Amino acid sequence: MALLQFISAELPEVQLPVTIHGDHLIVAEKGAKQDLENAKQQYREVYEFLASASARYNIGFWKPGSGIIHTILFENYAFPGGLIIGTDSHTPNAGGMDIILKLAGIVSVSGGKSKIVEFFGPGTETLGATAMATVCNMSAEIGSTSCIFPFSDAMARYLSATKRDFIADAARSNMGLLRADEGSERYYDEIIEIDLDTLEPHINGPYTPDLSHPLSKFSNEVKGSEWPKELSHAMVGSCTNSSYEDLKKASELVRQAETAGLKPKGVANSVISSFNRNFVGRHDGNPGTHSFVTSPELVTAFAYSGSLHFNPLMDEVLDSQGQAFKFTPPVAEDLPTSFESGENYYQPPAEDRLAVKVQVSPKSDKLQLLTPFEPWKPGNAEDLAILIKVKGKCTTDHISPAGPWYNYRGHLENISNNLLTGAENAFLPGDRGHALDLTTGTAAAVPAVARRYKTAGIRWCVVGENNYGEGSSREHAALEPRYLGGVAVVANSFARIHETNLKKQGMLPLTFADPDAYGR
């Protein structure tokens, strides 16, 4: 969608070095090789569009199979002191995951808004580079603008392992620029101390990444709740923590389990994952699924118990012989001896860019060229109908759900059919994703009502509560309401990235002067 917007701006080429990454469309199902081929077939026109448009507009393209953007950037582009602007919301274990889960529980999903989080102290020297990347990646879940660690030996080792010794040498020669000045803590707005010696593994959820539970207390909190106690799925691998160290620890636990003859267990309807988000319907589209977030090694251990009451540090399970078995905490080096680059999936910009034609079929249901929105007119924000009064948490997953809708991320008209289908309407309790059509007096799906209003020339707004639009940076959540005739979103507060996206698309993000006004 970002590339389609660039094309609509009619600029000849990008003005800064830019790369595009063909990730998020490969479904892990039958194995890497077959899954990649399936994605290439299913999304052929999308990949061909990305490749041709990148070649035409002086953009590098990492083709499908190269990996996710977060890891590619970390292994190839990121360096100490560098600034990289990524269009994903979290482009950069007690490890990194436990640190950020603990911090989220302290400051909440909005506690980092308009702030840069800087980590300092002796604990930073104990973390590997990829553990720091996990923390920075998931700092988006506390709403922070960015996250910084001081340069360390672990970073130098990582740069060397990824064949960038010259950058490590340059960093060592400029340590004064890459570490906080002595006494800087006197000038921080707030200092939060986390003792890594006493920090225990954490599990956060359900429904929000800031509901934090230390592992030792988790079972009791499950007992005191109405959450489903049995697990349906345990999922490892995400942009947040798929490092060598993370997966090595998970594989070590799998090896222990296989030696003991254990098999993974699972029934509906709780999910535990090492992903970064656990919002309503995030994993399976089911608003009743209770999703929890933790480290890859804990996810792996839970898979073999099948119960949220399990504490892998203390509890035992029965092996294939009926004997008590207890996992040994996994240990893994933070880096391999060297990284194998494998097949080169990078496509540089074309030398003769003007000869490259970018084709988008008018019959495509996955791609659609954009036309400019109508310019703003005086009076546009007057006499607005309320399309929906959103009740409770409203993330970008509520505004523009993912799942099967990923197929239409390049087709604004089609993907707009998911607008606010995950949101709960305070005017229609229990009828999620529906709105009352003021022209007919009947209820219908939110996008259907929005389209009717647009056709009838009725301008509308959305009313929300706190931290509206948290979660993914998904620009569709701002494009869709504008496309369907929306003018404004009025809320008590906004998540930083979504507020910015609304402004960029010409939607007014307005806040109540009196927070109690929402309830009136």
Image (cartoon, rainbow, N blue to C red):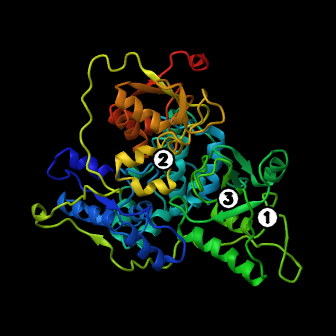
Q: Nearer the viewer, mark 1 or mark 3?
A: 3
Q: Which mark is residue 34?
A: none
Mark 2 is surrounded, within 10 Å at the Cα level, by few (under 14), some (14 to 19) or many (20 or more) other residues, namely: some
Amino acid type of the residue tagged 2 in the rendering: Ser
Dot 2 or dot 3: first in sequence order is 3
Distance from disc 2 to disc 1, alpha carbons, whole Å, reads 33 Å
Residue 77, above or below 432: below
Find disc 2 in the rendering and name its residue. 472
Mark 3 is surrounded, within 10 Å at the Cα level, by few (under 14), some (14 to 19) or many (20 or more) other residues, namely: many
Find disc 1 in the rendering and name its residue. 313
Q: Is residue 494 left or right of residue 14?
A: right
In which image quadrant can residue 427 be found? top right
Find disc 3 in the rendering and name its residue. 272
How far across and down, in percent of the image, does residue 174 sit?
36, 56
In front: 94, or 214? 214
Q: Residue at x 87, y 83 (%)?
A: 321
Distance from disc 1 to disc 3, alpha carbons, whole Å, reads 17 Å
Q: Is residue 52 left or right of residue 253?
A: left
Residue 507 makes an appearance in the image? no
Q: Secondary structure at mark 2?
A: loop
Mark 1 is surrounded, within 10 Å at the Cα level, by few (under 14), some (14 to 19) or many (20 or more) other residues, namely: some
In front: 268, or 14? 268
Q: Residue at x 67, y 58 (%)?
A: 272
How far across and down, in percent of the image, does residue 414 sit?
39, 48
